[in-house]
Image (cartoon, rainbow, N blue to C red):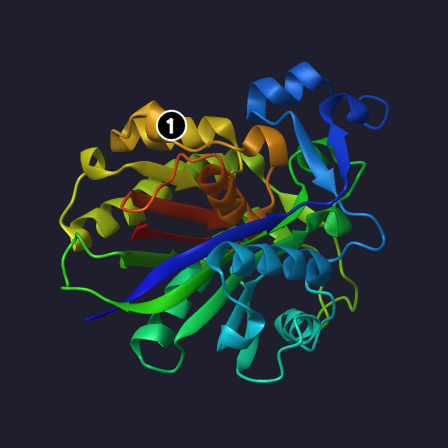
Amino acid sequence: MIRSVVRGTGSALPRRIMKNADFEGMVETSDAWIAQRTGIRQRHIAADDETTASLGEAAARAALDNAGLTPADIDLIVLATSTPNNTFPATAVDIQNRLGMHHGFAFDMQAVCSGFVYAVTTADLYIRGGLAKRVLVIGSETFSRILDWSDRSTCVLFGDGAGAMVLEAGEGAGGIADHGVLAASLRSDGAHKDKLFVDGGASTTGTVGHLRMEGREVFKHAVGMITDVIEATFSAAGITAEDLDWFVPHQANKRIIDASARKLGIAEQKVVVTVDLHGNTSAASVPLALSVAVADGRIKKGDLVLIEAMGGGFTWGAVLLRW
């Protein structure tokens, strides 16, 4: 059977690093308060000349280099983002043009922090359906553009960045030993829309708006929803948490990561954590963490890797891959 196999990963981060202490003169908070409650130590903030498209392009080029491929080898670009360069056209076609690609097709996917998980699942379907042989999956965000910098409950949590992955059609026997995407589970429930949202939009206010969040409500739902889709993915693949080599969760809050891993019985040493370095980068979170773990040698060929995320909407999902 056809499998969507990982060929390469890459990432890109804005030049500016903003430490927790930098917030102390802006809002009523402290480095200790932020670190204790979230695990975040720093985040990257985009300059005026750094955008979702430019960061996405840089991450895409890094992933292509890692895969030993060029833009000419790519059939499709799927960009997960909630902070596009323009309302339209899709920022994916901007990246396509920046890469010098004038073939294939490209589109954006909007599922907030779950965007990359949704995008990997979508790319897998295009590959298995025969509409693309190689897909560039990107998560790129500039959440600093939609933050209310006077709201201490949200402005300290988010950062900017991009991560990318190249998926390529391969062959497998149809079992758990195959390389590539093995199983996935996606969910959403719009009843929770007002718990995490942006208070603007082209069709409503005609403005970009700012991010708003009921932090305690998000935390309350997060662990249960995350474990729900992960257990469904385990069931579909016929595995347990003990079979995993690496768990790469959405990097939103260290407490959520730890609680989810404990509930699922995933050993702490198998969990990839980068929230301290990047903060919550929404759809860029998972591919950034993957890129770090691949670059430092933790994730190796043959490893069984689980990625998951939960975002505004609510949306949530998980994907199991063998590297």
The answer, for residue 200, to whether it is visible in the render is: no
**In screen coordinates, is 161 left or right of 255?**
right
Query: Residue shown at 73%/18% (left/top)?
Result: 30
Q: Amino acid at mark 1?
A: Ala
Position of 66 with respect to 126 (left or right) is: right
Q: Label 1, on which residue?
A: 259
Quadrant of the image occupied by residue 242: top left
Relative vertical location of residue 130 with respect to residue 290 in this rendering, above or below: below
Spot occupied by residue 294 in the image (x, y as percentages of width and height):
45, 42
Residue 98 as seen in the image, left or right of residue 298: right
Residue count near mark 1 (Cα–Cα under 10 Å), binned few <14, some 14–19, many ≥20: some
| Residue 225, x across and y down, in percent | 36, 44
Task: Identify the element where label 1 is drawn.
Answer: helix
Residue 206 visible in the picture: yes
Give the answer, above or below, for where 22 lies relative to 235.
above
Residue drawn 32% across the image and 50% down it? 323
Residue 60 coordinates in the image, percent (x, y): 59, 60
Q: Residue furthest front?
A: 68
Please provide percent x and percent y for residue 268.
35, 24
The part of the image, by quadrant, that contains residue 54 is bottom right
Name the residue located 57 percent from the left edge and 22 percent from the top edge.
37
Question: Depth check: 305 or 266 in front?
Answer: 305
